[in-house]
Amino acid sequence: MSTTTVNLNVNGKPVSAEVEPRTLLIHLLRENLNITGPHIGCETSHCGACTVDLNGKSVKSCTIFAVQADGAELMTVEGLAAGGELHPLQEGFVEHHGLQCGYCTPGILVRSYRFLQDNPNPSDEEIRVGISGNLCRCTGYQNIVKAIQYAADKLGSKEAAE
Amino acid sequence: MADMDTMTLDEREATIGGIGTSRKRTEDARFIRGKGNYIDDHKLPGMLHGDFVRSSHAHALIKSIDTAAA
């Protein structure tokens, strides 16, 4: 199959790669670019472990072709910690035990990031609906919700302080 | 600090830790950064990939296996 070049910004850095038209974005990230934060969990678009932030939207990278990300701004979990400092979401997950095996965590972190951008003051119920595209087999979601509330508070008070 | 023999759990949690107290996990640091290093994250020189080839027949005899494509 012939290849084509995709150019995009990943976590603030411009990248260029040769891909086949059939190459999925998740494979571009994991195989070509060695960005292994996003995980493959299901092969059916259900689990959300592959979630990335593409042009300001949460996207399951297993359901997008790499060529569709040409010219895009992409963020993965590796891009959350700005300059070495943990994002409040990451802090929240550590403080509130929002992870056990950690496999779903990158996808949930990236999804929660966009969710809080869109809804900075959510109720627990809104959080549960907001992350319903991400499955977790370990935690039962209770501590995930607490972790996201922690981050919502921290981001809210940071904004108020600025 | 209260006497070790008569400390309450809360007092122990605040001071020496130990039985019954909470511990922070050490593995979270890499999981939340996407550096979990799960099996599929590994890339080793000379690494091979395995895949399962399923039978297209419910009940059949294997006469030969052609591995040319693999």
Image (tube, coloured by chain):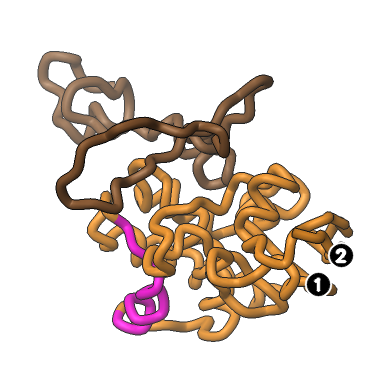
Q: Is residue A34 left or right of residue A41?
A: right
Using the numbered discs, state the Cα–Cα distance from disc 1 to disc 2 in whole angstroms. Answer: 5 Å
Q: What element carries label 1?
A: loop
Q: What stretch is highlighted in magenta?
A: A125-136
Q: Which of B30 and A30 is in front in this view?
A: A30
Specify the farthest residue to the front: B63
Specify the amino acid type for callout 2: Asn
Q: Chain B is drawn in which colour?
A: brown
Q: Which disc number belongs to residue A7?
A: 2
- Which residue is at 33% across, 43% downward? A100
Residue beneath the point at 63% across and 53% down: A27
Q: Is residue B3 magenta?
A: no
Q: Do the residues labelled 1 and 2 touch (CB within 8 Å)?
A: yes
Task: Name the foreground residue: A2 vs A100.
Answer: A2
Q: Mark 2 lies on which chain?
A: A
**Residue at x 52% of width, y 54% of height:** A106
Can you say which quadrant of the picture contains the C terminus of chain A?
bottom right
Colour chain A appears in: orange
| Residue type highlighted by circle 1 | Asp
What is the x, y in percent for residue A150? 44, 64
